[in-house]
């Protein structure tokens, strides 16, 4: 839910409603349908649209959903975004958006999300959904044994005392922005883990130059933990009274039945955790050195008073004041807002004043220009964003002030600049972003933010970077990937020629091939990528455990053959050598097609029969309902959640193997694939048929009798399948009953 000035936004997938109380009895007597595509009615509970968070920029952010919205001039506008997060959204004083997913506690949008949607040629999105926590340097410390989790049967996941060492189900990130708890908590991040009955605290640090990370607040302890197994914190709020509110669902079962392992179901029954229910409560975290703030009544305040509240020390009050001013649209406060934006002693008040002016469509170039020189890097970064409405005007005086910030000492300012320069006129944009990429080519966030504004011009900028003496490897790889993904044949041939040039630095040659490979696969990889990994696997999702090939053509999926109209002799010559460049070239040659390319050896898969076509269509519908949240529409999976299905050696193996996975679930390096034995034999056969013939996959269809046979053979297998077990089956060993 999101409370507005007049009504409450209510998400009830697939519907988003505006509920209103017209007679003052605090009960909604009127509701209007805003959207009917807010998630999926049939979607699983743990992967559906959620979170309606009004951001500093006046957009209402969502989690695990493909669009977000804003209320402007009394009407809701919707904009597309990339699906990120799982449950919950948080925001810090600078307006950065935070999310988390499954076992990964904290991600931040270092660069706002809208930039990564505008260029469909991106092959990586660094800066969006950046992980802040090193998984090797964080741990949780429950105060009780926590064997009642999905994988509680795995001793290696538990300490000797039976407590989990890492999150089985983290959610609801919250940045504390209140003023009635000790100051050292200000700006800290808090997350809940309901399976292990705790609230974890992270200290977020800035290195002094705009780069942030997070670390555990306690060496071996928790902010809040309970010995009561029914303590289930599911949400957190930085509260209006300056404290922290903890929403406790208080019940024995929090794992959705669709994802329960057989082990957990048995644990629930043995410990009688099904009841009671409807015992939820809200805890307030206070401190004995402070008193709580008064109860707010901002809906009754005058516009002038709301402007004053923008300077309140508690972020909740500032947020609500801004939201009310924007929704009410009273422009009489514009002079006071401009004064506050330029003269307030607290940078947070200056930020709120600027974005309130923007929400009222009252922001002006002079205020923005002066804010570009603000002493706070967060204000400067926001001023760059706000300047975009004028940057598109040729020779606007604001352009020079914005471009000068390429010399700014702060990374957050320069990264925002890289994103915002995409608003310049085309010729100015290419020149400015080329200079920025040459200077900061080793920063993946700057690189991806810059390329997001270069749609259709990636090849031209790539040519400029290749003329430089410095390697610029990451920028070259990402530009090459984007140009390839755009299916620019001339650019691809030029890249191959440059990669074959032995007079060119090897780092450049290898970067070109890695980018070419990433662009051929065509999928956007959220983080990591070429900057943090070796080879194209990190950027393109290839070469990961369980992945082979993926360049073929099944019933669906598109082969990259349209890139090559004749045999790529230079590329083949490169592939015939030895070393890293030859390895990269061979990987590309294996993926692509051209007229006359010899067919790969192996059995030919016949076309689907009419009955199999019906099964495929039914599987496509089931995939959208059950599987798409984790494995994604393109089948390439979701980072930290699910692996790719494109070319997956398990999905495309003998049908007995993927049938086992769907019936029993699977342990993996990415996460737990839940068992789906509740589906019928026909449904499992349909999903498998779809997966095995979509996205270029070309394996045989699966029928219900096969699934029924495997269901019977594995009836005594009570735990999810492990990688070694499945590899043993792949090798043809141990396929008998019960295995």
Image (tube, grey):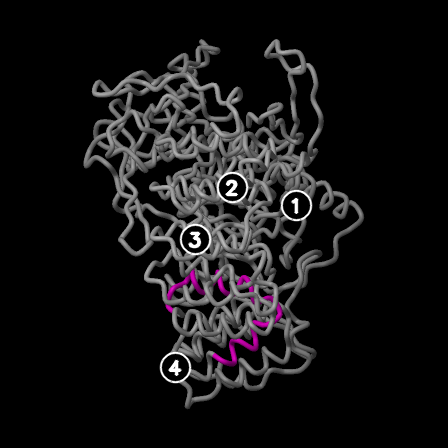
Q: Residue at x 25, y 39 (%)?
A: 216
Look at the picture and state if 225 lies above or below 97.
above
In terms of secondary structure, where does tag 2 sit?
Answer: helix
Q: Is residue 14 visible?
A: yes
Point out the stretch of residues depicted in magenta: 442-464
Disc 2 versus disc 3: nearer the observer: 2
Q: Image quarter for residue 341?
A: top left
Quarter of the picture holding the N terminus: top right
In terms of secondary structure, where does tag 3 sit?
Answer: helix
Check disc 2 and report the residue beneath it: 335
- Count of numbered labels shown in the rendering: 4
Sequence-wise, the earlier of marks 3 and 4 is 3
Check disc 4 and report the residue beneath it: 506
How far apart are the alpha carbons under marks 4 and 1? 47 Å
Disc 2 versus disc 4: nearer the observer: 2
Q: Nearer the viewer, residue 434 or 48?
A: 434
Q: Image quarter for residue 177?
A: top left
* Badge 2 vs badge 3, beta-carbon distance below 8 Å: no
Sequence-wise, the earlier of marks 4 and 1 is 4
The 10 Å Cα crowd at callout 1, few under 14, some 14 to 19, many 20 or more, is many
Q: Residue at x 34, y 26 (%)?
A: 196
Look at the picture and state if 445 lies above or below 289.
below
Check disc 3 and report the residue beneath it: 371
Q: Main secondary structure of the magenta part?
A: helix
Q: Residue furthest bottom?
A: 503
């Amino acid at each position: 839910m999101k409370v507005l000035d007049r009504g409450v936004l209510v998400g009830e997938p697939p519907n988003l409603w505006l509920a209103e109380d017209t007679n003052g009895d605090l009960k909604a007597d009127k509701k209007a349908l805003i959207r009917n595509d807010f998630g999926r009615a049939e979607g699983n509970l743990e992967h559906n649209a959620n979170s309606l968070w009004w951001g500093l920029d006046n957009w209402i952010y969502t989690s695990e959903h493909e669009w977000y919205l804003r209320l402007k001039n009394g009407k809701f506008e919707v904009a597309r975004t990339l699906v990120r997060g799982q449950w919950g959204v948080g925001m810090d004083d600078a307006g950065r958006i935070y999310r988390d997913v499954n076992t990964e506690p904290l991600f931040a949008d270092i660069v706002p999300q809208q930039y990564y949607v505008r260029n469909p040629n991106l092959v990586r999105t660094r800066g969006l959904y950046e992980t802040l926590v090193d998984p090797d340097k964080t741990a949780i410390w429950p105060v009780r044994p926590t064997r009642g989790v999905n994988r509680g049967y795995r001793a290696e996941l538990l300490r000797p005392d039976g407590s989990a060492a890492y999150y089985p189900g983290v959610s609801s990130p919250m940045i504390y922005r209140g003023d009635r708890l000790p100051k050292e908590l200000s700006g800290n991040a808090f997350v809940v883990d309901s399976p292990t009955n705790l609230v974890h605290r992270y200290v977020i640090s800035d290195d002094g130059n705009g780069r942030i990370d997070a670390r555990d607040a306690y060496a071996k302890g928790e902010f809040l933990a309970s010995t009561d197994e029914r303590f289930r914190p599911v949400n957190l709020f930085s509260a209006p009274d300056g404290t922290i509110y903890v929403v406790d669902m208080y019940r024995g079962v929090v794992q959705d039945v669709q994802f329960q392992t057989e082990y957990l179901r048995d644990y629930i029954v043995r410990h009688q955790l099904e009841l009671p229910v409807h015992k939820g409560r809200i805890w307030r975290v206070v401190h004995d050195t402070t008193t709580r703030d008064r109860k707010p009544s901002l809906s009754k305040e005058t516009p002038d008073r709301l402007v004053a509240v923008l300077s309140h020390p508690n972020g909740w009050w500032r947020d609500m004041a801004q939201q009310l001013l924007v929704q009410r649209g009273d422009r009489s406060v514009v002079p006071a807002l401009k004064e506050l934006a330029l003269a307030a002693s607290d940078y947070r008040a200056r930020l709120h004043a600027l974005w309130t002016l923007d929400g009222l469509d009252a922001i002006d170039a002079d205020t923005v220009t002066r804010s570009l020189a603000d002493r706070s890097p967060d204000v400067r970064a926001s001023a760059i964003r706000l300047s975009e409405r004028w940057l598109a005007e040729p020779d606007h005086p604001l352009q020079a002030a914005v471009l000068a910030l390429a010399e700014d000492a702060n990374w957050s300012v320069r990264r925002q600049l890289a994103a915002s320069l995409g608003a310049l006129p085309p010729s100015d944009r290419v020149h400015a972003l080329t200079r920025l990429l040459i200077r900061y080519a080793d920063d993946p966030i700057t690189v991806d933010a810059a390329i997001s504004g270069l749609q259709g011009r990636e090849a031209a900028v790539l040519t400029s970077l290749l003329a430089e003496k410095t390697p610029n490897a990451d920028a070259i790889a990402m530009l090459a990937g984007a140009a390839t993904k755009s299916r620019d044949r001339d650019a691809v041939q030029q890249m191959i020629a440059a990669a074959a040039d032995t007079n060119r630095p090897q780092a450049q040659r290898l970067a070109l091939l890695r980018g070419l490979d990433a662009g051929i696969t065509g999928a956007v990889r959220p983080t990591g990528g070429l900057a943090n990994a070796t080879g194209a696997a990190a950027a393109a999702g290839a070469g990961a455990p369980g992945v082979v090939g993926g360049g073929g053509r099944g019933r669906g999926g598109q082969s990259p053959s349209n890139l090559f109209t004749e045999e790529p002799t230079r590329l083949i010559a490169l592939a015939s050598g030895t070393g890293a460049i030859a390895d990269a070239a061979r990987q590309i040659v294996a993926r692509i097609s051209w007229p006359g390319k010899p067919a790969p050896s192996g059995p030919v898969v016949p076309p689907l029969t009419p009955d199999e076509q019906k099964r495929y269509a039914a599987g496509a519908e089931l995939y959208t309902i059950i599987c798409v949240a984790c494995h994604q529409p393109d089948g390439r999976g979701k980072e930290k959640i699910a692996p790719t299905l494109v070319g997956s050696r398990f999905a495309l193996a003998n049908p007995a193997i993927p049938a086992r996975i769907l019936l029993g679930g699977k342990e993996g390096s990415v996460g737990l694939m839940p068992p789906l034995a509740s589906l019928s034999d026909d449904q499992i056969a349909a999903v498998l048929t779809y997966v095995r013939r979509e996205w270029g996959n070309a394996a045989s269809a699966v029928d219900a009798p096969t699934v029924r046979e495997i269901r019977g053979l594995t009836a005594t297998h009570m735990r999810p399948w492990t990688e070694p077990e499945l590899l043993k089956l792949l090798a043809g060993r141990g396929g008998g009953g019960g295995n």
